[in-house]
Image (cartoon, rainbow, N blue to C red):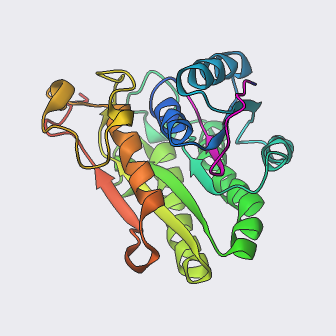
Amino acid sequence: MSSSATSSKGTAAIVGVGPKLGRSIARKFAHEGYTVAILARNLERLSMFAEEIAREEKAQVFAIRIDCADHKSIKEAFEGVLSLGCVDVLVYNAAYQPFPLHPSSFTEIPVNSFERSLAVSSVGAFLCAQQVLPGMVERARGTILFTGCSASVSGMAGFSELCCAKFALRGLSQCLAREFQPLGVHIAHVIIDGLVGTPRVPSMMLRLPFGEQQSGGGGGGADGLMDPDALAQTYWHLHLQDRSAWTQEIDLRPSTPFRFF
């Protein structure tokens, strides 16, 4: 873990932090003054991200290992998260998809792979939300953001395990929104309709107020890949929304679609 002695606006927990979107979201909330807990399975890599973000943003950043397919691991991880204080923001960005990313014949998908996809994308989200919702309801405020993808809304041949898991996550988001938004908790589902690349201008997007990015700046998705720093701006904007006009679902895509196959 890495920390800095700056005052904090609150605590954000980002589950599923890799080198692209998760890291950009964590950096954005750290830049805005939040204490950030970043969670993933690879603690060594996660600790490197925590050190990097803490150094660049002069923020408190804590690396906590989690296996989103393991109930015990989730409970233990959130004991660490909640020791930092009440969670104001939960971003669930974890997903399971075997690599390389290519269609699999339905009859050849191992049942344990199908079950793991469901466990990571939907059951893990369910359990993480259960950890933070009591505190959010008690304070009548909080934000939970779930990361979806194209597979959340459209079944695709060869991607049964991903689609079924992401459909379930979308349903969970809608159910929680209807139950907890009247209690002051903003819950939204973010559909990433494309492939996420690397930041085109590292950290630059984080320093621009939402809506002030130049159209087409940094490549503007001309290669069909999505800039994770630009996506992180949307997650931040969702957190800031006034409760009289909350978004429940939003879809994001590049100006030039990426061709998968």
* Residue sticking out furthest to the bottom: 182
The magenta segment is 2-18
Asked if residue 158 shows in the view, the reply is no
Is 248 drawn above or below residue 207 in the view shown? Answer: below
At 72% from the left edge and 24% from the top edge, which residue is drawn?
A: 2
In the shown orientation, is residue 132 left or right of residue 148? right
> Residue at point 69% right, 20% down?
47
On screen, residue 145 above or below 40: below
Q: Position of residue 46 (x, y in %)?
A: 66, 23
- Say whether residue 246 is magenta: no
Q: Quadrant of residue 114?
A: top right
On screen, residue 203 above or below 145 = above
Q: Residue at x 64, y 16 (%)?
A: 48
Q: Position of residue 184 (x, y in %)?
A: 59, 77
Quadrant of res 225: top left
Along the line of sight, the residue nearer the viewer: 32 or 223? 32
Q: Position of residue 133 (x, y in %)?
A: 71, 66
Camera sees residue 118: yes
Q: Nearer the viewer, residue 54 or 24?
A: 54
Q: Quadrant of the C terminus?
A: top left
Left or right: where does residue 149 sit relative to residue 124? left
Q: Quadrant of the N terminus?
A: top right
- Write the residue at 71% across / 72% down: 139
Query: Percent from the top left, x then y, of residue 20?
Result: 45, 27
